[in-house]
Image: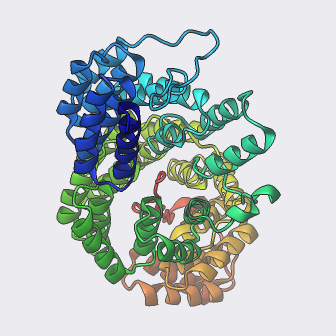
Amino acid sequence: MSSSEILKTVRKKVTIETAKHQFTNALFWGDKAVSLSGGDARDVFAVVNVLYLRGEYQRAIYFIQAYNQQNTYYGAYLIAKCQSARGDWMEAKETLESIPDPSPLTPPPSTEGIISEYDLLSSLYLLKGNVYQALDNLQIAAQYFRLALKADPYCIEAYENLVHNHYHCGKYEEEVLMEATTNSDLSESESEMIRFLYGGLSKKYHNQGKRPVPTSLTSLTNNVTVLASQAERLYYNCKFRSAHEICLKILKLDPFHFPTLLVHSGCLYELRKKNDLFVLGHKLVELYPRSYLSWYTVGVYYSLIKKWESARQCLSKSTSLNKLFAAGWLAYGHAFAAEGENDQALATYFTASRLLKGCHLPLLYIGLQYSSTNNPLLAEKFYKEALDMAPSDPFVLAEMGALYTQTGRWDLALSYLKQALVRVEDGGHEWTATTWTPLYINLGQVYRITKQYNEAEKCFKHAQFLSTDSPAVYAGLAFVYGMQGKSLQAVEYCHKALDKQRQDPFTLQLLEMCLACLAQEGKSENEEEDDDEDGDILIRLPQFNVTAPITPF
């Protein structure tokens, strides 16, 4: 057998052993192939790739330098890749800056075993984005992720970084996706497929309607990624049971699909399934102790059982493992706010807003904190910023309406609350008591204050349908009936409210007034209409309500 035939046989053996993950065998024969070929670049890089897979990053760098491949495009890229894997971000940055951009001339063909500079361009931009992201230079990182996607629209990792790390708001994400799919190298069917799959990853509160599967892609209907996108969209629409059912379907196919697990943990929290959440958190910590998702799930469990100190410890660890994890930062802030630690909650939300430039939820919760501490001017400022980023989010509109109700700006309150109601209905949100009862109560309250009693009664009746246990609903109806002169009905609903919340001072006072009216039927029942604003019942949206994954999760 000639030397060339021996080399060919050894190279084949290296390829097979690498595919089998028999890295010791592959490394042994790869070294022999390098000697037999006199240091051929393809054999050098075959050994380097094995060393990288074994986690021997420094040895891989030395091997590249030993055979003078550090100045080649592929060699420099692999050195930067090894440096970033070791966490040497500044060294990786310097190496990447030394790599020149490819010439705009006709791209050269790839050599067997060596990726050409043109085929490597998207990966190079992606690596640069990861390095700058690790160095907290998020603006430049976003630029490189966008370049990576433009160079190769199939580079899902670049798009996931832009979306999951919230570099841009929803509208800008659509622009980036449109720019990528107008690539001249893509066919129309390829562009349609990428727009459909990537569009499912974008912000769910930006476009809350259903996303039909294109006819050419019906075979992807039960794909895990497509199902996970549906589950997340249902979650944002507050359809927690439907989202939970889809998550269970996905987890039967892939029990550790992280995007699904993120939504699944949120559903378990909203459905108050604390045992299931405990089991899930325990399993994830056991199998993935260094994963941000594992500690986030445990933190959500502790939040559910209201052990806030333990929740904060776990959520702090989660955000330290992934500092751009939006859901972790929000839950961490909620864990402070739940115990009235407003300064710490504000600091957490401000950190989240600084890191997650394209996410409006930190701004919403900053506004909530300022509103709860009676600082309406600052609350309004941050609500408006959140609304600029997510004009379709009914939670922001509802909070704006609640704030204007609190400050007595009835026309603005009515406008925003009605807009929120329209968004909820158009977006296909599920009518859950804990989520949307406050919206109807606040809207009914504004109608009552503006003397639109029939509309106010309708709103409180809707709220009663959603929540039969809310004393504020019955008190609101009693007030409306009292203002309409229906004292007997007002007394009836006062008693219902007191049955839910005994010794409530406002309801007791209202009951006393209604009984007095019944005793003096001949007198006017509306002598003090100017006192209409006394005893307003302002119900805030739940502080821990919007814990949705910011794709997520």
Residue under the image location 27 percent in, 75 percent down: 305
Image quadrant in which you'd find residue 500:
bottom left
* Residue drawn at (69%, 44%) of the image: 195
Q: Position of residue 105 (x, y in %)?
A: 62, 9
* Colour setup of the view: rainbow
Relative placement, left or right, of 414 versus 61 is right
Total labels: the figure holds: 0
Residue 533 higher or lower than 196, as above or below:
below
In which quadrant of the rendered view does residue 526 lie? bottom right
Q: Can I make out residue 255 in this image?
A: yes
Nearer the observer, 95 or 398: 95
- At horizontal 45% and vertical 37% (from top left) the residue drawn is 377
Q: Does residue 206 appear in the picture of this structure? A: no
Question: Residue 262, located in which quarter of the rendered image?
Answer: bottom left
Q: Position of residue 439 (x, y in %)?
A: 58, 64
Q: Is residue 328 above or below residue 287?
A: above
Q: Is residue 546 above or below residue 241?
A: above
Of 179 and 382, nearer the camera is 179
Instruction: Write the residue at 46% across / 71% down.
Output: 267
> Residue 284: percent from the left, percent from the top?
29, 68
